[in-house]
Image: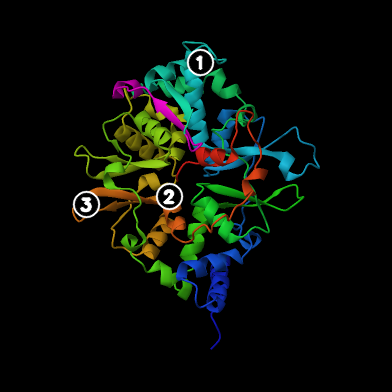
Amino acid sequence: MEMESPRSPEAEIGHRVEDLWEVAEPQLSPSEKLNSCFEDIAVASFPRPLGSQVIEIPSNASLADTVEILSKNKILSAPIRNVDAPEDASWIDKYIGIVEFAGIAMWLLYQSEAAANGTAGSAVGSPVANLVSRLGSFTFRRTSSGRVETTTDPESDETTSVGGSFFETLTSSEFYKNTKVGDISGSFRWAPFLALQTSDTFLTMLLLLSKYRMKSLPVVDIGGDKIENIITQSSVVHMLAECVGLPWFESWGTKKLSELGLPLMKPCKLVKVNEDQPVLKAFQLMREKGVGGLPVMDTSGTKAIGNISIRDVQYLLTAPNIYKDYRTITAKDFLTAVRQHLQEQHEASPLLGSVITCRRDDEVKDIILKLDSEKIHRIYVIDDKGNTEGVITLRDIISKLVHEPRHYFGDFFDGVVPLPPNSTNIGSMVSSSAYQP
């Protein structure tokens, strides 16, 4: 009987994996067989979204323009194009980094401390300088493993309580309008331009997006002058969703979450914020814990009433007027104001829906289908009483699909550009710049 044609380019990839799966060495374990299959497929074959183009940020764009471009195109990050590079420059000279919402939030907080100490261009008393007094001072330190972490002085929630007019003042400041994204691209708070070559494999790509915590990967040709594609965690999960029903996928996807050791985090380690805490506390926790989102809990602290992601910082910067009537902005206030704003603007967003949940005995493929259909980056695990006890992210799912063979990457990271002047280890740069989704 003739095999049914793949329903999409992503499903076609699934059929290629299926062909490789059938001829793989029989003595290999299922995990080793998947590794082998993905090692035999080049990233050049990863589908580009239909009708899409690679969104680039010119290095002379302001922070305000950058936030607007990311928000308008509904993307988390974009490559920074060096406007001073010659027209015929290769990609390695044309791009100087990746800008992302996580980096924007971190950079503003970092500059706040510098301004308060009199070491930045903003004067004490300016909106940026005042931000530090509300967030508490913090410093960056490098751990023994090379990872850069932030440490904050213990502060009460009052330090993150700001009035609704604060963000209007901040976003109208000359500092915010005039700071160029290219001027700060060398900071470790921006992701490195870690590009895949078209000849690199799916296994390399999947490992970088999971174990090495990269959220997006540009794909380039050797000697080429442009980005051919950008592969994200979301696009990989969409590919997996299109593979449902194929034997290789079903052998893995029908496993229960608990069988794969998901969720990875114990309930007591779940990063969360209560509904009556200041919304800036949520972004502060994301920065401190290196996570890309967290649940907003009800007054009992057991059930999630909403979710705030690092990308939602855009609503503090692009629509600051929606909070003008709030004396302080709690996490619940933030969700209420943003939801009303989105409804008035007729914009679709995961923020408008209820919290998406699952249980430990759900199958992996059901979680993949939920993440893909809802266009979300995380799903919360609940117990029999509906209490929130864990989270599963896109990265967690991908990390359970493949494993890293011994000495697999070798000197792969040696070619990462750009290397900040104060950086001594590119591996630490990769891990410190990438938030979990």
Q: Residue 377 carries which label?
A: 2
Task: Please name the amino acid that badge 1 sits on.
Answer: Ala
Disc 2 versus disc 1: distance between alpha carbons?
A: 34 Å
Please indicate, yes or no, whether residue 244 appears anywhere in the rendered image: no
Residue 279's place in the image compared with 295, above or below, is above
Can you tell which quarter of the image residue 199 is in?
A: bottom right
- Residue at the image position 32 percent from the left and 28 percent from the top: 278
- In the image, taking residue 51 as reference, residue 316 lies left or right, namely left
**Counting other residues with Cα less than 10 Å from the Cα at mark 1, is it few (<14), some (14-19), or many (20 or more)?**
many
Please indicate, yes or no, whether residue 258 appears anywhere in the rendered image: yes
Of label 1 and label 3, which has the lower sequence position?
A: 1
Stretch in magenta: 144-160
- In the image, taking residue 433 as reference, residue 316 lies left or right, namely left
Quickly name the residue at label 3: 386
- In the image, taking residue 379 as reference, residue 91 lies left or right, namely right
Q: In the image, residue 157 lies at what x, y percent?
A: 30, 24
Q: What element carries label 2?
A: loop
Q: What element carries label 1?
A: helix
Residue 32's place in the image compared with 427, above or below, is below
Task: Please name the amino acid that badge 2 sits on.
Answer: His
Q: Nearer the viewer, residue 61 or 265?
A: 265
Quickly name the residue at label 1: 115
